[in-house]
Amino acid sequence: MDSYPAVESHGLIGDLQTAALVATDGTLDWFCAPRFDSPSVFGGLLDRHKGGHFRVSPEGVDYTSKQLYLPGTPILITRFLSADGVGELMDFMPVAGDVATDRHRLVRMIRIVRGSMRFRVECRPRFNYGRDPHELDTYPEGDVFRSPSLTLTLNPVGFDELRREAEIRRSKEGVCIVGTFHEGDYGGAVLETASPGQPRVIGTGEVRNLLEQTRDFWRRWLGRSRYTGRWREMVERSAMTLKLMTYAPTGALVAAPTAGLPEQIGEERNWDYRYTWIRDASLSVYALLGLGFTDEASQLMHWVDDRIREAKERETPLQIMYRVDGSPDITEETLDHFEGYRGSAPVRVGNGAANQLQLDIYGEGLDALHVADSHGLQTTHEGWMNTAGMVDWLCDNWDQPEDGIWETRGGRQDFTYGRLMSWVALDRAVRLARRRGRPGDTNRWVSTRDQIYDQIMARGFHPGIGAFVQHYASDVLDASLLVMPTVGFVSPTDPMWQSTLRAMDAKLVSDSLVYRYDPNASPDGLPGKESTFTMCTFWYVQALAQSGRLDDARLTFEKMLTYSSPLGLYSEEIAPTGEQVGNFPQAFSHLSLISAAVNLDQLLDARH
């Protein structure tokens, strides 16, 4: 199990339709094609033997490695340093465009900076999560892997003389090339899915053009950011990470590009996050608008509008998550032939929580609509009428047990957060209707909103512990309620909120890191223990700042930055050892970092 690299020892590259992870040893061990939610082609991250990989790393030499991104881009550079030489591996994916395609390119280029270095290049794909067989067709110019569902073409770049001298081995397992490279040598491979032709030798000039086009695209995009605050580098890296996890043909944002990475090593809290949650999409609108990325926010809102329209047409509630193309079909299955990351089984693909009832999504959706409207992104007549119908549905259905934001599998409860965000949904609907003069049963909406408010105050606050609690039948604290002052439900100076925050300080916070809840005190239907939840820590920063504890908020934020990967990436959770666990990188983590940074900047500037 020690052969698995740490989760945070990976860089993310992508082309806005799918993505790949590259470890610090040069192994590409996660890549799905043609979409984020397609089966894996390289899945070594979940099974080192059966998952497949594309390795480019030094051979027979002691070395250290370091990773960085080409500034202002997601172009990844892995540097290998040894006593005899220094080599660099550059990985990137040319942008695939706004039209869905099966054709995707992974560019992997080696450059020897100093001395000489022997490299091993090993391409061993395993299609459909390692379940489909494949054939290898060899041509003078390269190789093609053919499976029943996908073809993968390995095109060499440069190294003409070295390719003649290198040791090349081909088998049904894959292609392996071992050779010694010297200072000034530059070459590599372009791996292509669904190539329209046979393999060909690609010139280094063509690859340099692809590199420049990719670099310029990302720098132009990043140049649209309006953020000039204290944490510009981290905020911009988070923004690029969110963009990398966006499916350009629809604008949908996946929660993470990975599946099956465990929340606790060796345990079974392993989920597939390669889908778009209504919640994530809605919260991302706020983060994107805060940076000035109105086009991306607008496209996300259109995607959410389409899901609301479809739910109305089907006469069903909103589903909590969908595929990137809007399909609601997300059947969960286990990959029993995969051992799981460091033995963390079962490995699940699909997500059985898709049909859970989570009432909070209506609040996040309406809040995003409200924020977008305040930035000039008004909804259409059809969009508003569909939304108004959804609000009417919520008036009829808010007061019932539900599954909650954390997708626990321990049974439905009257979760306070679900009630809170139902209040938000009705409050924002009323404001939108009145601001824009839109039709709607606002008298009923106001009455229901106030009814929810009274219920939360009467049943959601536990006088024994002096805090708002997870659900009405519990005295357990829940970090989701950190947003109460942010959404305007309670004043940050209200004694009921101040005592809640103090209770969370004592029960949920560990050296600035925040647990979602205590699973031992509130059984969630799953074995294993919780790690601290990165998004909740950034929510805690905002709650501290809004509650007048600005110095505490800044210190907590700065501490949290030390837990990022060397490339500035965050997974879902931070383990007690400080390592990152869960799917990686996580949209929730990065969008909450952006929001915390923007809000903290504003409050710090106002103080001075």
Image (cartoon, rainbow, N blue to C red):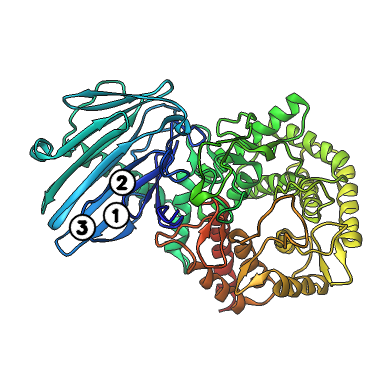
The amino acid on which the numbered mark 3 sits, given as a three-letter code, is: Val
Residue under the point 22% across and 51% down? 59
**Residue 295 horizontal/vertical position (percent):** 51, 42
The amino acid on which the numbered mark 1 sits, given as a three-letter code, is: Thr
User: Separation of disc 1 and disc 3 at Cα?
Assistant: 16 Å
Q: Is residue 512 left or right of residue 558?
A: right
Question: Mark 1 or 2 closer to N-term?
Answer: 1
For residue 396, which quarter of the picture?
top right
**Mark 3 = which residue?**
61
- Contact flag, marks 1 and 3 (Cβ < 8 Å): no
**Mark 1 = which residue?**
78
Q: Which of 336 and 470 is in front in this view?
A: 336
- Tell me the crowding category of disc 1: few under 14, some 14 to 19, or many 20 or more residues within 10 angstroms, Cα based: many
Q: Quadrant of the C terminus?
A: bottom right
User: Separation of disc 3 and disc 2 at Cα?
Assistant: 22 Å
- Tell me the crowding category of disc 2: few under 14, some 14 to 19, or many 20 or more residues within 10 angstroms, Cα based: many
